[in-house]
Structures are given as C-alpha cells and as structure tokens.
C-alpha cells in the first residue's frame, strides 16, 4: 500500500525558505521506497511511502515520481524492495519473482527507457549474485543506491558539458521539468543552466508551463526560483512569440528515450518547439544520460507513445476545464526527428552529428 | 454598475440541451447592454447587464465578452447606451460626451481594431444626425442594431466563402474561439466549419485548448458539441504532434487585426501554429470580417500587443498553478506575418495573395 503522510501546505514564506538541493526526489527507508509527491508540488510537500511493488508501480503511473532518470532510480529501488519483501526461500524462487516484478514495473509507463534499463540491470545483478535470498536482497539494495549515486554524478557531468554551450546572458527556453525533481541529482536539461548560473553567466530562462500536468509551472519554476535563476513563466503557446522577437537564444530539453538514429521522445510539445527553433535558427539541445539511449530501436517511429487519460486534459484536478463529455486526446510524448536536434548532451560528452555512430560509441564507452 | 444575475449552474443534462444558436452573445435591453458571461461558460450561464459605459468597458476588459466582432458590437451598444443615459441637453454637449465615451471604450482593449471601428462609426453617425439629443440617442441605438445585423450577415458570408476551401472529411485545427460567441452570429473561423458540416462534409475539428483563458476548451468545444461537429480537444502543445502524423489538413483561425500588408494579429499561439503549418505544408487560413482590416497600419510590427496581467497565467481563477511570486508574461496576442497566411477569408471574398492590393480593394468595396 502507498501511504501518504499528512502534507504540510506550505505558506509562501515557509516555502520560499526551502532549498531544493535539500529536497530529495527518491530515497530509501527500511522497507519503503519514498517519494516526494510531485502531483502536489509546489503547493504542498507530501511524502509517499511505497511498501510494495504495486505501490511503486502505481506511484510511477500516477506521476507521483516522473522524469526518466528519477523513474529509473525508483524502479531500481522497487526491485530491491521486492527482494527484501519476498517470501521466496531459495534463489530460483526469488529470481522468478524478480522477473515478474520487473514486468509490473516496466508496464507502469511505456516511453521512458530508463525504467526497463534499471530493472534489467537489477535483474542482471541478482542473477550474478550467488548465495541465498538474503544476500541477493542486500546486493540489490546496494545496487539501487549505486544507480542513484551514478545518477547524481551523471547530472553534474551533463551540467559541465552543457554549460560550455551557454554564453553570458543566454536566454534559454525549456519545456517540462528535466531538473532535480526528474533525477536524484542536479537535473538533465536544467544541469547546464544551473552550472552556467553558478559560473556567473547571468542566464534568463523561459519556462514553458507544460500543459496538461504543468511540470514547468509547478516544478521547473520552483527549482529555478529556489536556485535564484531569473525566469519568465509562459504558456506553451507563447514560445514562438518570444522566439520571433529574438528573445530566445537556445532551447534545452530532456528526453525519455533517444533511439539509435538520434530521434528523441520527450514530453508532448517538444517536437513543436524543435520545429519552431529550427524556423528561427535557434539551437535545440537535448540533455540526457546515456541510460536514456535505446540502441535497440532504429528510429523514432518505433518508440511507444504513452496515451494517458484524456481527463487529465479536460480537468485540472477535480475542476472541469471543458464541457462534460467532450472528446480529448492526451499523447504524453512526441518524437523529435534527429535532424532538428542541434546536439545531444550526455554525461560522456556532446554529440552534434553522425548520431547513429556517435551514440553507439558513447553507450559502448560505459 | 455591472449587475450579475444569479447564475444557474447547469447540470450536464440541462446544458446538453442548450442550443448554441439560441445563445445570444450581446443584446440590448432598455437601458442595459447585456452579455453572456464568457468567463463562466460552459460551467455556468450567467448574464451581465451593463448599465453604464464604465461597466461596458470593464466587461470588455475582463473578457466577459471577447472576440473581435463581438467586442465591436458591444462597443456600439455602449455608445448607444451613453447617448441614452446622457445628461447633455444639447447636441454639442452630447457629441462632446460621445467623444469621451469613445476613448473609454477604445482603451478597454488595445489589439482588436473592430472596437475603434465600431465606436468611430457610431460617432460619425451621431455627428451626421441633425436634431436634438433624443433623436441622436434613437439613431445610435438603431445603428448599433444595424452593426449587430451586419455582423450576423458577415458570419454567414464568411462561412459560404470558407466552406469551399474544405473538402469532404477535412480535419481542421482551430485555436481560441472565433465562433458564435466571438460574434453575434455564426462565428468567423468556425463559420466555414459549420457551413461545411451543414453541407454534409463530415469534418473533424482539433480544438486547441488555448491557454491561459481556455477559450478553446471552454467555448469552441462547447459550440462544436452543440452543433454536433466531431472534435478532439488538445492542449496547445499537441498541435505539432498531430500535424507531424498527417492528421491535420488545414488550420483556420480568426483575427483581431489585419494590417495593410496582410500581417495578422490574433490570440497568442497563432503565430506558432502558422510556422508549424508551413513546416508541415498545411494551409493556414485566417477568417475575419473586413472590419478587422486596418489599412492605417502598414505592417504587423505596428500593431499594439495587449499585455495582460500575468496572474491570468499563474492562476486559474483563484487556484495557483505556479509557485507564489514567480515572474510570468502574458502577451495576449501575437503577429503572424502575411507570408505564412495561405488565404484570408472575408465576407466579401477570399484573398490569397497580393494582400496589400487585395485587402485595400475589399475594404473599398464596402
């Protein structure tokens, strides 16, 4: 069961004093995978403690935790939780159970590849661990911690590589939230922005609100404000206007899956931004860890696009935004062809062309 | 004072039985300009009765009535109301007052040119009317009725001209609400859609929700549903995705001002759609009456863009969507260069090229 603690509705002042660097996205407590509830931020800060694999899968599905890297870490802890809670008495029984658990977790969301990457890695570790069920459980928890720590290091590296692309006074547009809340560290798309800000480059960030879940308005605006980075919140429909006025120098977004040819699946709205950026001769950057790269798919056409409940479009929480019963669509992601991507920023370096060859090289360098 | 009647919160069923063709947008009652409150639709149907010019200006400013043609008719009735309520005892006194009233009304919104067009026409009529104040007041009310009736006829004509551009099974994308609620008749952008639907062309309409005011989700979705026209409501950020999949055959939008060279000011988000349409080789049509054409401005750069309160972006009604105090922007309109406009559909015909010359010809044909 997923138990929610009583949330403190943060007052303006209390909330202003929060430092995001202290806000954990995913963490472990004995017997529970803990998550800050991102459906409630920034208006309330609540912790969700998932004490079963089903609860972890539900939390991923319901966007309590979101962002490809954070989902990967959460799923890794989910595998560790399953091993710890398992009633299996021998190694084969536990491995069978972990195969089943991997399927449950992988099915919770369909587009972000970090999810199945993390569960696959955990299963591989379990299979390579010789002794009994207790040892496997301990080993898996250690591996989940390691995945989390790698995620933190990966964020810093993306920041270091990406910051070099941002000049003094750059005006950067971002979409959705590929920040600290989408990872366990510094963020992906926001990492270069944070790093450049720390270097004193005096950036300004245009934050797309990112309908329908408002990750930009709720999460990115919060993170940037906490970090003291100047921002302007805009509706998604305003991006072209500011590009047309010459007020945007580049776009940086995250990714949920990057396939062999460099096509990128990311939050719905990303493809449109990429087309607009190209039309205005503005660089369009994608920042993501190499765990987001899926060499098993040749092109973006093969990426499964999650279709979410249209009620998330027609309603804001319980509040109806549209006439009752109106038909709506909610493809949660879109695919940006590699030809519109100026560069992909990873923790192992920046790829600017020849994606097919270079992405393979980066993955194999791991 | 602007008095609001107690609104009936319509239940799903009551509301389903509404026929939009029976819903009046703007109408006259002795001593009051009456408006259906578009800030409340479709969730509640309330009438706002404006008994002073200040109340009319406030209703326009607060979007109780919106849509360039509807604003024009409302302002015309506002001038008639002023004449009727005036304490002036002679013709010069009344004309002085009407000049002052025109300024108040014109200042209520800055981008839609139909507003100053209508007040200018009313003032011109007052100046040409010879006898005393009572006669002028009567003449102005008759003129406001005439502007309303012309608006209704204009909508039908736009529908007739525009429907010819829509083939059987066309999948049309529209933004904001340029429908019956934006006019006193059949709509502008929605007129060709309605007409083609009546002709049995089996259209499907993608409706951009149109943040932040949600004219698409609240008003256009309602109008189309009432008219029995199949629709899919999408967030503004989804348009590119559906265009990229080949699911959109054309875009039709309204306009708040069209200048001499054919540049078009319309709801924020329109420019981005025009760029996306061009990138996908999809026709982009603008439907508007000739009263929306402003030959006094040479290019779109000269159009004043209304900047609205950013709280309308950071809040939905009283509900905060973003962290407290975050900086936001709300340019209410953007400008689409004529080069991205495939055709302009007016009540006097369709202009497809040589906008400079052809728009002038259409205006002078009036």
Image (spheres, coloured by chain):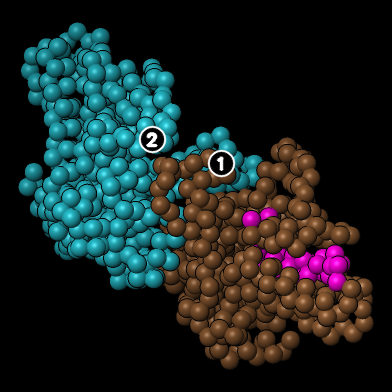
Chain colours: A cyan, B brown
Relative to residue B344, is residue B124 drawn left or right?
A: right
Q: Which stretch appears magenta? A: B62-88
Please tell me in which quadrant of the rendered image residue A137 appears.
top left
Q: Which residue is mark 1?
A: B318
Task: Pick whichever, B91 or B219, lies toward us.
Answer: B91
> Which residue is found at the position 35% from the left and 56% from the top?
A206
Residue B224 in sight here: no
**What is the magenta segment's predominant secondary structure?**
helix
Percent x, y of residue B129 = 87, 83
* Mark 1 belongs to chain: B
- Could you say where residue A353 lies in the image, as x and y percent from the top left? 17, 64
User: Image point 57% across, 44% down: which residue?
Assistant: B317
Horizontal arrangement in the rendering, residue A290 relative to residue A279 (left or right): left
* Same subunit: marks 1 and 2: no
Q: Which of the image's four quarters has the C terminus of chain B?
A: bottom right
**Residue occupied by mark 2:** A13
For the residue labelled by badge 1, is the local secondary structure a helix, a strand or a loop? loop
């Amino acid at each position: 069961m997923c138990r929610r603690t009583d949330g403190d509705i943060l007052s303006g002042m209390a909330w202003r004093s929060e430092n995001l660097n202290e806000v954990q996205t995913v963490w472990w407590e004995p017997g529970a995978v803990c998550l800050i509830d991102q459906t409630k931020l920034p208006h309330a800060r609540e912790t969700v403690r998932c004490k079963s694999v089903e609860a972890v899968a539900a939390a991923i599905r319901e966007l309590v935790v979101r962002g490809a890297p954070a989902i990967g870490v959460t799923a890794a802890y989910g595998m560790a939780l399953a091993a710890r809670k398992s009633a299996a008495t021998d190694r084969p029984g536990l491995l069978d159970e972990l195969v089943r658990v991997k399927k449950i977790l992988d099915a919770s969301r369909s587009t972000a590849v970090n999810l199945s990457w993390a569960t696959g890695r955990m299963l591989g570790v379990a299979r390579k661990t010789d002794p009994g069920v207790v040892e496997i459980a301990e080993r898996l928890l250690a591996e989940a911690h390691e995945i989390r720590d790698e995620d933190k290091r990966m964020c810093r590296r993306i920041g270091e590589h990406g910051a070099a692309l941002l000049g003094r006074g750059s005006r950067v547009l971002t979409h959705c939230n590929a920040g600290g809340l989408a990872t366990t560290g510094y963020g992906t798309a926001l990492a270069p922005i944070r790093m450049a800000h720390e270097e004193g480059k005096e950036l300004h960030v245009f934050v797309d609100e990112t309908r329908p879940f408002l990750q930009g308005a709720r999460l990115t605006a919060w993170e940037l404000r906490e970090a003291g980075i100047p921002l302007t919140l805009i509706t998604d429909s305003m991006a072209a206007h500011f590009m047309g006025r010459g007020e945007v120098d580049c776009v940086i977004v995250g990714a949920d899956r990057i396939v062999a040819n460099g096509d990128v699946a990311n939050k719905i709205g990303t493809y449109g931004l990429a087309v607009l950026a190209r039309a205005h001769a503005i660089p369009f950057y994608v920042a993501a860890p190499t765990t987001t790269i899926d060499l098993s798919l040749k092109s973006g056409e093969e990426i499964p696009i999650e279709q979410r409940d249209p009620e998330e479009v027609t309603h804001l929480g319980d509040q109806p935004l549209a006439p009752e019963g109106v038909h709506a669509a909610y493809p949660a992601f879109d695919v940006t062809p590699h030809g519109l991507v100026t560069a992909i920023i990873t923790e192992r370096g920046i790829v600017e062309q020849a994606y097919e060859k270079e992405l393979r090289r980066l993955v194999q360098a791991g």
